[in-house]
Image (cartoon, grey):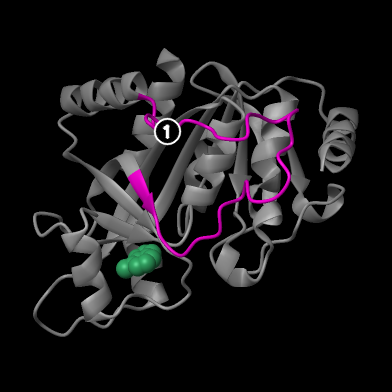
């Protein structure tokens, strides 16, 4: 694993010489976020040794290096989901590469279904904690000591001071911000009515098919993490609740300007 990470890092360093301090992982329908970056270099995943290649509609599949909020950043346009058939080591590989490139802070976004009945489509939810459900833990197997400890503490996976900063930024701009617990599931099916209900009962506010494995790998390596969900559908509702991928992408696209603003301001204040 370490050899693979080093080979990916060596390739990237050969074509891009700056050191990014902030890593950004963008969720479904959030790919145009990078229009706000001053782009210095784009590297297609297919060019990087050992990088998996993204297949899902709405994910373009490249690492984008540049500047945002006055900081050097690297953004993943398109991420790898467990439901696509990637091994969990592949899902978290880019996060490990980011760490070895020099990234200290990781910002993630995702599209999620809402269980909290006060949420509406288009809301932004700061993730204050997560519940990992049916998603394979990326740290299973022999521990790689160069990455982190055997039994990482998970009492504060989402950095509290970054959560407070983003709340302040949102309040100043009158951006309505929710806060809650994200349930990570494998997908690719959206939840049944009974499953949404279950997730609500156990304390979940939103549910999605990404993020948790990446956050575990990041916390293992000591990265500072902040994550936010765009509520793209409401799972808990009495009327017809058919959910489509197209609807998810549309809602995520509509919420994107707000999310971009918050990420950009947060990066500026890091
Ligand atoms: N469930 C799981 N993942 C999702 C959902 C959902 O309702 N919406 C967007 N991603």
SS for callout 1: loop
Q: Position of residue 38 (x, y in %)?
A: 60, 29
Quarter of the image that includes the N terminus: top right
Q: Is residue 188 above or below residue 37?
A: below
> Residue 260 is drawn in which quadrant?
top left
Q: Is residue 18 above or below residue 178?
A: above
> Residue 122 is drawn in which quadrant?
bottom left
Residue occupying the point 34% across, 31% down: 262
177 with respect to 80 (left or right): left
Evaluate whether residue 40 shows in this view.
Answer: no
Q: Residues within 10 Å of mark 1 (few under 14, many from 20)?
A: many
Q: Which residues are magenta?
A: 130-159
Q: Is mark 1 within 8 Å of ligand 1?
A: no
Is 192 a magenta residue? no
Is 135 a magenta residue? yes
Q: Kindly report the secondary structure that dominates the magenta region of the rendered protein.
A: loop
Q: Position of residue 251 (x, y in %)?
A: 31, 61
- What residue is pinned by disc 1? 157
Quarter of the image that includes the C terminus: top left
Residue occupying the point 75% across, 20% down: 18
């Amino acid at each position: 694993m370490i050899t693979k990470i080093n080979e990916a890092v060596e390739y990237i360093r050969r074509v891009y010489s700056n050191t990014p301090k902030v890593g950004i992982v963008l969720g479904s329908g959030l790919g145009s976020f990078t229009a706000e970056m001053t782009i210095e270099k784009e590297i297609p995943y297919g060019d990087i040794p050992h990088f998996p290649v993204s297949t899902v509609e709405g994910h373009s599949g490249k690492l984008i290096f540049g500047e945002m909020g006055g900081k050097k950043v690297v953004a993943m346009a398109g991420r790898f989901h467990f439901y696509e058939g990637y091994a969990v080591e592949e899902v978290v590989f880019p996060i490990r590469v980011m760490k070895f490139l020099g990234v200290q802070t990781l910002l993630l976004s995702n599209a999620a279904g809402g269980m909290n009945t006060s949420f509406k489509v288009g809301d932004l939810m700061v993730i204050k904690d997560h519940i990992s459900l049916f998603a394979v833990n990326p740290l299973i197997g022999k521990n790689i000591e160069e990455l982190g400890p055997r039994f990482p503490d998970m009492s504060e996976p989402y950095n509290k001071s970054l959560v407070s900063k983003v709340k302040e930024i949102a309040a100043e701009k009158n951006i309505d911000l929710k806060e809650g617990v994200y349930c990570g599931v494998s997908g690719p099916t959206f939840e049944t009515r009974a499953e949404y209900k279950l997730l609500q009962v156990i304390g979940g506010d939103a549910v999605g098919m990404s993020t948790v494995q990446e956050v575990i790998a990041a916390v293992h390596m000591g990265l500072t993490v902040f994550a936010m969900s765009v509520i793209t559908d409401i799972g808990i509702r009495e009327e017809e609740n058919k959910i489509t991928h197209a609807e998810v992408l549309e809602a995520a696209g509509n919420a994107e300007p707000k999310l971009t603003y918050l990420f950009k301001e947060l990066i500026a204040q890091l």
